[in-house]
Amino acid sequence: MVVQQVLELIAVGLLAGIFGAILGIGGGMIITPVLTIMMGIDIKYAIGASIIAVIATSSGATVAYIKDDLLNLRVAMFLEIATTVGAITGALLTGVIPHAMLYIFFGLLLMYSSTNMIRKLRGTQDEAYRPVTPDKWSEKLNLNGSYYDVFEHKEVDYQVKNVPGGFAMMFGAGIASGLLGIGSGAFKVIAMDTIMKMPLKPSSATSNLMMGVTAAASATVYFFNGSIHPQIAAPLAIGILVGATIGTHIMTRLRPRVIRMIFIPILIYMGLQMALKGFGVNI
């Protein structure tokens, strides 16, 4: 039975690593509901394992994205100031919030992410990047960048705008990460892709790097309050490292639209499960 659970955790980590690397969401949104709903693990330990899983996803994906020159390190390091402070704040709040509220909040977060993906499917997200006028902050901080799009077979130069708005969004993303044990990558991608007008691929790649730093900032708190169990976190990390490597190769070669179409139903189902469980209803 122990061997079976280890294999199940590795399989969960593998899938979480693949989707997390592709979408820039870290895998925490997959791991926490799967561990609690399908495997019956207490949400406290599921969140602790998810924190470690997010760090593993970030580590595996970041190495590949650096090689592909998709990361915008200046954007990541600047915005990480906000997410790190937010993550510590969120982690410190976990001891005073009931588990039922965590379930409800996590479920709502999942469903919000699914509606955001639906909007992207109906919009122009997968069209060619359209240059924007950078603001004074992006020019002062030298946040504009470029990357080679493997799918389009061309070099893409892009500009960054609305830096203060993205910074504020990142603080909220950090609080969600520390409170729920997730990389809050959906918020990070929204901040860069929607608010700061970066293309989706560097937004996702940069989000993967930032998630690891954000999660590491709150991991110490979870370790000392006994929420991290190595027998749960270690198999997940192994699967995630492999999955993240696979996911990075897929992301550079496929349109995100296809992955979103597969992932949206999963997010909606998991979100409903978590929210209803917070109200004491199991489906």
Image: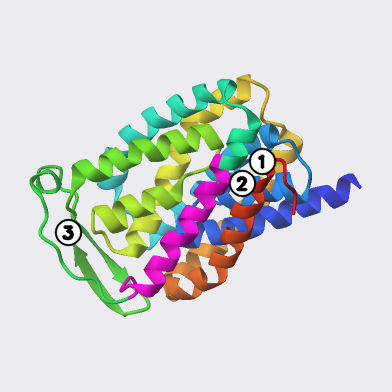
Query: Which stretch did the figure color magenta?
Result: 105-126
The numbered dot on residue 275 is 2
- Alpha-carbon span between mark 3 and mark 1: 45 Å
Q: Amino acid at mark 2?
A: Ala
The foreground one among 115 and 41 is 115
- Residue 69 visible: no
Cα–Cα span, label 3 and label 2:
38 Å
Identified at 29% across, 77% down, the residue is 127
Q: Amino acid at mark 1?
A: Phe
Secondary structure found at label 3? loop
Marks 2 and 1, Cα distance to the nearest angstrom? 7 Å
User: Which residue corresponds to mark 3?
Assistant: 159
In the rendering, which numbered label is found on residue 279? 1
Nearer to us of marks 3 and 2 is 2
Q: Secondary structure at mark 2?
A: helix
The color scheme shown is: rainbow
Q: Position of residue 112 (x, y in %)?
A: 47, 53
Foreground: 202 or 136? 136
Which quarter of the figure has residue 82? top left
What residue lies at 41% left-to-right and 72% top-to-bottom?
A: 121
Please rate how many residues cluster around mark 3, counting C-alpha atoms within 10 Å: few if below 14, some from 14 to 19, many from 20: many
Image point 43% across, 25% down: which residue? 89
Identity of the residue drawn at 55% across and 30% down: 219
- Who comes first in sequence, dot 3 or dot 2? 3
Q: Is residue 105 above or below residue 63?
A: above
Q: Which secondary structure dominates the residues rendered in magenta?
A: helix
> In the image, 190: left or right of 249?
left
43 to 139, vertically: above or below: above
